[in-house]
Image (cartoon, grey):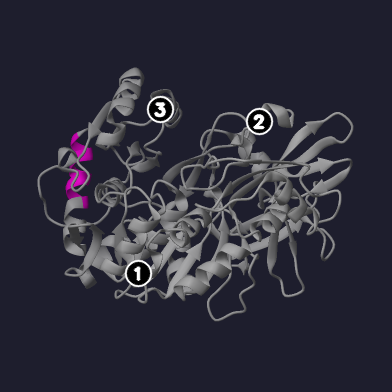
């Protein structure tokens, strides 16, 4: 089995009558999901899509997303998923760079996508949220998925590099397939009785692999929320008897701060999974205490399909750690020359395994830089403890160097999260004439809570070394976030009176 979509055909054969997908009142069984995906494959073929052609997809978390995704794979196409919040010029770049043959969009992004497709000279098909009928060919007999080799690209995922234009990470059928299987078997331990909550955007690899592809493998039900909201998520957990919740740290915070959280029955939850960015230990502790469910934190990147390391079930769980490498993956810490660092020292995480991308689409130099020796360089700095658990200290690029000392934003953020009034915090470096950089923190408070910058500065000062505490602290209503809800340090704006970045 090389085509990733074969998993849907196998599960539909086995669990055809079970509910596969749900979005409020709408739902599809595995058999209906499979049949709809086959009709999408026929519709794409009718539009001239051949095996290996790229199909753009700009859809939020609606029922049409899994159907179009698996339909495109069944036709042997390569899927290029995009965030529905992109503007026309950004979509145009993705379509142009990937050489997409056709692009599928929902109502929300239709204007921008249609404009971009027109500029590039390809068709844009707008589909309804519940069922992508506009794209479907006639119902046909169930046929095998188009044969694909293990190393063939299934998905091109654009990663927003901190510098330069986004690059397309080529994820293969085998890489995505093995990562979904390892997630399903060793992390989620999922069964057909599970109900997985799909809050993570499916156009992002965390949601794609860990909720959609792993869910399909297990024959579980995936319940979708097109736009995340903490109170809505809690209501759906109660309504659908959700057993597995997967989110980024800001989603866990939103559920914790939801106004009527105490009136909701979430007793069916057996497992919560966090990834995308480091979860503050304090948020994890409060969430577990409030909702009576354990949170397993993991780590990965677009380029690693994504899961690379995890706090595994049935093993010691270390809050603040990304755990140990998953099955089929090796991980080590290296210096700038690619040599192993000494035990206990900080180094860059390098990854090798079946989950690593084939390379960046049509960028051989970038690929060689990222994978110089078979080991993918992540740009994340970490240290390892004596049990082999990894602790991320920061992105290589986001480390602050103050007067020759390295300051890792994560450590300062952790200290501030312990303050009872703090909801979210981002620590950044701002330019300083003598020290090079000075440490600064933008803080969003919990609803109804109060604290002033001086109080927060003193709070941090009491918890971290003198050279580390933030000399500049200011309050914001909310922090800038990426498509997955991850706080974007680089997008934090510094008030004029606090100096320049």
Q: In this rendering, is residue 365 above or below 185?
A: above
**Residue tagged 2:** 495
Find the magenta span and give its range.
Answer: 37-46
As measured in the structure, the alpha-carbon distance from the residue carrying label 3 to the one carrying label 2 is 27 Å
Lower sequence index among marks 3 and 2: 3
Which residue is nearer to you in this view: 102 or 459?
459
Residue at the top extreme, as displayed: 119
Say which label, 2 or 1, has the lower sequence index: 1
Return the x and y of residue 51 as percentages of the image width and height.
32, 42
User: For residue 87, which numbered disc appears in the image?
Assistant: 3
User: Foreground residue, 241 or 355?
Assistant: 241
Determine crowd level at label 1: few under 14, some 14-19, many 20+ residues with C-alpha closer than 10 A.
few
Q: Residues within 10 Å of mark 2 (few under 14, many from 20)?
A: few
- Choose between 166 and 328: the one closer to the eye: 166
Q: Is residue 337 visible?
A: no
Q: Do the residues labelled 3 and 1 touch (CB within 8 Å)?
A: no
Task: Check if residue 43 falls in the magenta segment.
Answer: yes
Q: Residue furthest bottom?
A: 314
Secondary structure mostly taken by the magenta-highlighted segment of the chain:
helix
Residue 265 in picture, x, y percent from top left: 34, 73
| Crowd around label 3: few <14 · some 14–19 · many ≥20 (10 Å) | some
Total marks shown come to 3
Alpha carbons under labels 3 and 1: distance apart: 39 Å
Q: Residue at x 58, y 42 (%)?
A: 488
Q: Which of marks 3 and 1 is nearer the N terminus?
A: 3
Q: Is residue 19 above or below residue 61?
A: below
Image coords of residue 326 (percent x, y): 57, 67
Question: Which residue carries the number 1 mark?
Answer: 263
**Does dot 2 land on a helix, a strand or a loop?**
loop
């Amino acid at each position: 089995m090389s085509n990733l979509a074969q998993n849907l055909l196998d599960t539909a054969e086995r669990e055809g009558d079970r509910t596969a997908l749900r979005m409020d009142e709408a739902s599809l069984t595995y058999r209906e999901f499979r049949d709809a995906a086959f009709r999408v494959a026929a519709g794409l073929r009718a539009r001239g899509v051949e095996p290996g052609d790229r199909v753009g997809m700009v859809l939020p978390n609606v029922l049409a997303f899994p159907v179009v995704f698996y339909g495109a794979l069944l036709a042997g196409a390569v899927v290029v998923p995009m965030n529905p919040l992109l503007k026309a010029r950004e979509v145009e770049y993705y379509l142009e760079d990937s050489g997409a043959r056709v692009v599928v969009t929902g109502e929300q992004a239709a204007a921008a996508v249609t404009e971009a497709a027109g500029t590039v000279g390809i068709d844009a098909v707008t589909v309804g949220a519940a069922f992508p009928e506009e794209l479907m060919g006639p119902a046909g007999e169930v046929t095998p998925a188009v044969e694909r080799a293990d190393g063939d690209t299934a998905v091109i995922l654009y990663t927003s590099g901190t510098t330069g234009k986004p690059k397309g990470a080529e994820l293969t059928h085998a890489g995505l397939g093995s990562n979904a299987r390892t997630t399903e078997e060793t992390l989620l331990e999922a069964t057909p009785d599970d109900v997985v909550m799909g809050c993570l955007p499916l156009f992002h690899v965390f949601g794609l692999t860990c909720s959609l592809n792993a869910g399909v493998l297990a024959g579980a039900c995936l319940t979708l929320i097109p736009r995340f909201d903490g109170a809505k998520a809690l209501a759906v957990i109660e309504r659908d008897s959700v057993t597995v919740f997967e989110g980024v740290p800001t989603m866990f915070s939103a559920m914790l701060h939801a106004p009527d959280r105490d009136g909701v029955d979430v007793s069916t939850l057996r497992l919560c999974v966090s990834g995308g960015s480091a979860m503050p230990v304090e948020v994890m502790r409060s969430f577990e205490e409030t909702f009576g469910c354990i949170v397993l934190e993991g780590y990965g990147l677009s380029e690693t399909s994504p899961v690379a390391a995890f706090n595994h079930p049935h093993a010691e769980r270390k809050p603040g750690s990304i755990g140990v490498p998953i099955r089929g993956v090796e991980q080590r810490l290296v210096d700038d020359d690619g040599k192993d660092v000494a035990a206990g020292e900080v180094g860059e995480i390098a990854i090798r395994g079946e989950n690593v991308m084939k390379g960046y689409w049509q960028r051989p130099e970038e690929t060689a830089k990222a994978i110089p020796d078979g080991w993918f360089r992540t740009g994340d700095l970490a240290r390892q403890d004596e049990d082999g658990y990894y602790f991320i200290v920061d992105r290589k690029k986001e480390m602050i160097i103050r007067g020759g000392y390295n300051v890792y934003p994560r450590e300062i953020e952790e200290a501030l999260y312990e303050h009872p009034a703090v909801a979210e915090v981002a620590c950044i470096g701002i330019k300083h004439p003598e020290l090079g950089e000075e440490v600064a923190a933008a803080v969003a408070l919990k609803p109804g809570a109060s604290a002033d910058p001086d109080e927060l500065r003193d709070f941090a000062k009491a918890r971290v070394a003198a050279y580390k505490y933030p000399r500049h602290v200011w309050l914001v209503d909310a922090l800038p976030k990426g498509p997955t809800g991850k706080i974007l340090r680089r997008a934090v704006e510094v008030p004029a009176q606090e100096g320049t970045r």
